[in-house]
Image (cartoon, rainbow, N blue to C red):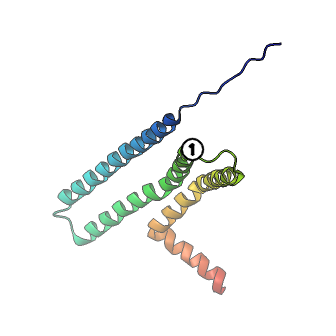
Amino acid sequence: MKMKKKVLVTHHGLKSYLLLDAIASANTFACILIAMIIQLVIELRHGMSTASRKTKVYQTRAVRSLILQGVIPSLFFLLPAVCPRILSTRSFPRHRCDCKRKASTVSILCVNVLSLHALAHSLTVLACSPAYRKIALNIIRKALYGI
């Protein structure tokens, strides 16, 4: 009886190319996002040169809220996307269970962080809106002090 050997060929360099591709994609997205924010701020400054002080304050608050509402929830998508890629490029010794356990734990934590995106988005909207923030603080005060 003749036995055939099966060999799995892996390309260790492929992992680094995937990481570089992910970093390049993230950098491209970040550059486009930063360019859009800079363009928005420039347009607001030129358009607001004759506006009243209250209007300038309102527009500044609106831009700050827009940036926070985009950046904070996005971190809950980026972190779980980047961590496994970094772990996959790091060469773990195959014979040690510690490393596999750590990778599994990090993977589970990434899924949990990803699931917190909706909560982060809601809390960001509440924090950026004065009316919602006031109502939330009143509810917390009533719960704590019973007033």
Count of numbered tags? 1
Report x, y in % for residue 2: 79, 13
> Which residue is pictured at 60% across the width and 82% down the height?
141
Residues 104 and 48: in front is: 104
Mark 1: secondary structure:
helix
Left-right relation of 71 to 31: right
Which quadrant is the C terminus positioned in?
Answer: bottom right
Residue under pointer 1: 88
Residue 61 at what x, y percent from top left? 35, 66
Q: Nearer the viewer, residue 64 or 116?
A: 116
Residue drawn at 19 percent across, 57 percent down: 47
Task: Tell me if residue 7 comes above or below residue 103 in the rendering.
Answer: above
The vertical placement of 62 against 140, above or below, is above
Image coordinates of residue 107 in percent, x first then y, are 64, 50
Residue at the top extreme, as displayed: 1
Q: Nearer the viewer, residue 79 or 102?
A: 102
Crowd tier of the residue under label 1, counting other residues whose Cα lies within 10 Å: few below 14, some 14–19, many 20 or above: some
Q: State whether residue 2 is above or below residue 60.
A: above
Residue 49, given in percent of the width and then of the height, sits at 16, 63
